[in-house]
Amino acid sequence: MNYDIVVVGSGFFGLTIAERCANELGLKVLVIDKRDHIGGNAYSETDPVTGIEVHTYGAHLFHTSNERVWRYVNRFTSFTPYVHHVYTTHDGVVYPMPINLGTINQFFHASYTPDEARALIAEQAGELAGQDPQNLNDKGISLIGRPLYEAFIKDYTGKQWQTDPKDLPASVISRLPVRYTYDNRYFNDTYEGLPTHGYTAWLETMVDSPDIDVLLSTDFFDESQPYHRAALVGRVPIVYTGPIDRYFDYSAGALAWRTIDFTTEYPETGDFQGTAVMNYPDLDRDYTRIIEPRHFHPERDYPADKTVIMKEYSRFAEEGDEPYYPVGTPEDRRRLLAYRDLAAREEGVVFGGRLGTYQYLDMHAAIGSALSVVDNVIVPHVRDGVP
Ligand code: UDP
């Protein structure tokens, strides 16, 4: 084996590990990925009909408040000043998301001040106001009250998860801010933007090192290729970013994931919806949202007479589907604990990334967690031989 470390999976977690190991620690790194491209779900490509950059696995918006992560990512790409905004069409009317004073006043045909709106929502949250609820349903109602919850969250969540919101973790909805101002930025973070030359250019720059080899279309579990599990584990340190349940042959049961099907359409117009993301929280449509990727890069010279849109349909992932969102029901969380125990005992293997930890991780969180693994696990291992 000519490598000091093998990274399984080339999403942001895996690539950050690979890049640091090669360029900071001088290690020889092999990255394998079962797909035929790097980048995991952050990968993007040029749409062949319109020339517009499309995020192949769904919209990816980069944002972070972590200074270290922001400095780190700027070594590989610059960022445009893009600021994400989302709108939502409920009952034939378009509202700004996340829920803010504009949404509240439009919904109630009112002109509440921030204090008045707070008082109203507290009243509508009823007995749940001010509590610290543990599931999505209770959390949603306590944050925005029942009428807004039922209009904008309940059925969207039903389409997105097909799981009783009482069984979903509160953290799913806590990602969305609620604001009593007219600020309708989607994210609260200090830094935000899209990679100037696209995600794939950024990802490629990360692995552009003589000390990193990348093998694509190479499945860690496929014993017909030389870099498979049995050939590697125990012989070379491994960073594994695939599904944690798959690694342990589903011995504690399969963890539930949601996957997304996209349908691509080419409306004959230079602007289909006037914004990058339009959510559809009502049950009159099966899809959850429509993405129009041209709006991610208003600075680019895209065709004025055509556009591309993608509709997103969410469903449970089955064998062979791409896992996107960990569901995280109480049953899943019990299984995850069993896998975490197994993972802790698996010598020489570090589990990371969205799939490897069964956690919804934003890109910046995956990168930040990989930097911590380098500091806390890999550097001590290289320096002191700590296993
Ligand atoms: N959500 C909702 N209505 C919306 C947007 C989001 O109910 O218009 C809920 C839904 O349960 C979703 C979660 O909030 O899964 C998180 O939304 P986010 O936009 O962060 O999801 P992502 O972009 O990661 O799919």
Image (spheres, rainbow, N blue to C red):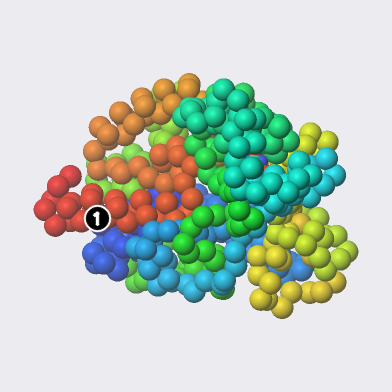
Which quadrant does the N terminus fall into?
A: bottom left
Q: Quadrant of residue 153?
A: top right
Q: Is residue 283 above or below residue 49?
A: above
- Residue at mark 1: C-beta within 8 A of ligand 1: no
Residue at image position (70%, 59%) is 276
Per the image, the residue denoted by label 1 is 375
Residue 258 showing in the rendered view: no
For label 1, the SS is helix
Residue 371 left/right relative to 324: left
> Where the C terminus falls, by quadrant?
top left
In-front residue for pair 253/283: 283
Amino acid on which the number 1 mark rests in the picture = Asp
Q: Residue at x 36, y 25 (%)?
A: 338
The answer to whether 94 is drawn above or below residue 127 in the figure is: below
Q: Nearer the viewer, residue 50 or 279?
A: 279
Compared across the picture, whether 22 is left or right of 256 comes to: left
Is any atom of residue 276 visible in this view?
Answer: yes
- Residue 12 screen position, x and y as percent: 44, 56
The residue that appears at 34% across and 31% down in the rendered structure is 340
- Residue 284 at x, y = what percent? 83, 36
Residue 27, quarter of the rendered image? bottom left
In x, y percent, where is residue 345? 25, 32
Looking at the picture, tell me which residue is in the foreground, 336 or 247: 336
**Ligand 1 - quadrant of the structure image:** top right
